[in-house]
Amino acid sequence: MQVNLMPGLVPLIVLILGLIISLIYYWVRRYPERYAITRFLHRNKAQLLLSTLCFILLGLVLIPVIFIPVPYGHSAVIWARFQGGTLMNVHLDEGTLLVMPWDRVYIYSTQYKVLEHEFEAATKNGLSIRINTVIRYRVKESTLSHLHVNVGEDYVNRLLLPEIGSRARIEIAKHTAEEVYATQRLDVQNKISKSLQGDVGLSGQSTCMNKNKNVDVNCKSSDYIELQEFLIREIVLPEGIHEAIVRKIEKTYLRDEYETRIEIATKEADRKLEEARGIAGFQEIVKKGISETYLRWRGIEATLDLAKSNNAKVVVIGGGRDGLPIILNTESTHSVQNDNSNLEKALNDKTKIQNAVQVVKGVTSKVKGDDQQVKKDVKADDERVIQFN
């Protein structure tokens, strides 16, 4: 029988019974001879007090046996001594159970549990490895009584772990150590989980219900336990094998890196070759249609575009050797003033040089005139000397 009692109700009942007994005792002491019942109680108060104490002690002893609390997330199976043992197809949910003292109540958790276990298995090439697994499972309420009768409370070691270990060993024996450790680890895990669907109830569906929605006696393990997830947390290999596999994987990735580098270098060489071919073809095509005059005109257009920019600059038309304009960029007003002063100084120097050149030319012409006069005088003197002789 299942009843729902408020927390603290049993101590309250005991307190009320104690108050009633205390009032009766006070009544007997206060009015000892007024009523027949008081006279009876007064004459037999020792026996009544002793009997009351015995009942109280008996109640205190039987209350934990009669009222059984079932916590949340749990279900209970009752073993009735005079009703044929375990009550099949019956499971009691959370709450407080009222049972006979000679019956037994077994409480099972129906919450999801996480179990960590290590299995030993042999690979395809005969190498012994250890697999650390994580298993998430729970029992099914519909078949809880049959699980209790057929397997018992130690169902994890009797039913769950042997089934999972067997399936894991069978699947690992199909692969090498390298596949299990590195390349096909997730695939192995998924195959083990898939193989457990029909044996340990990974799908969570019960298959042993009859037409009357009662549980048959002959149930499979998949009808007892719902396995939600099977995960491989770690694979432990012998030390030498582990290092060898790691080195092999490193070399494999290094080889892939070199192959990628070679492929990139080949692609780059092809790209440069195609680029060179394109440039050569462009030059062949353009060389026939571009003249010096056209290039000079394009240079003048580019110079005009640059001259339209916002920064200060001086454009000298026809100042270059090839006749292209010269752009003198000035960053600030101060630099412009400096350039102007330098230009004025250069003009002054040019004027001075021109004046000096004129003076030199005048002196040179005067010297030439004096020289000619001297030559004439010398010639006249020579003629006079000749006449005198």
Image (cartoon, grey):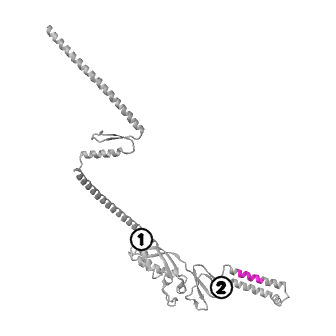
Is the magenta region chiefly helix, strand or loop?
helix
Q: Sequence-wise, which precedes: disc 2 or disc 1?
A: 2
Does 311 appear above or below 268?
Answer: above
Answer with left or right where residue 14 lies relative to residue 270: right
Q: Nearer the viewer, residue 379 or 13?
A: 379
Mark 2: few/some/many CA within 10 Å (<14, 14-19, 20+): some
Mark 1: few/some/many CA within 10 Å (<14, 14-19, 20+): many
Answer with left or right where residue 328 lies relative to residue 2: left
Marker disc for residue 66: 2
**Marks 2/1: CA–CA distance:** 55 Å
- Which contiguous range is marked in magenta? 12-21
Marker disc for residue 99: none
Q: Disc 1 on helix, strand or loop?
A: helix
- The three-letter code of the residue at mark 1 reads Tyr
Q: Residue at x 77, y 85 (%)?
A: 49
Residue 73 % position (x, y): 57, 79
Tell me whether circle 2 and circle 1 mark residues in contact (CB < 8 Å).
no
Where residue 29 sits, quadrant-wise, is bottom right
Residue 168 visible here? no
Q: Does the magenta stretch include residue 20?
A: yes
Where residue 260 sits, quadrant-wise, is bottom left
Question: From the viewer's perspective, is the residue at label 2 or at label 1 nearer?
Answer: 2
Residue 258 % position (x, y): 34, 61
Residue 83 % position (x, y): 60, 92
Q: Nearer the viewer, residue 372 or 10?
A: 372
Q: Residue at x 67, y 85 (%)?
A: 62
Q: Which of 356 and 17 is in front in this view?
A: 356
Does 213 appear above or below 266?
Answer: below
Does 30 appear above or below 264?
Answer: below
Residue 197 % position (x, y): 45, 80
Marker disc for residue 181: 1
Does 374 appear above or below 271?
Answer: above
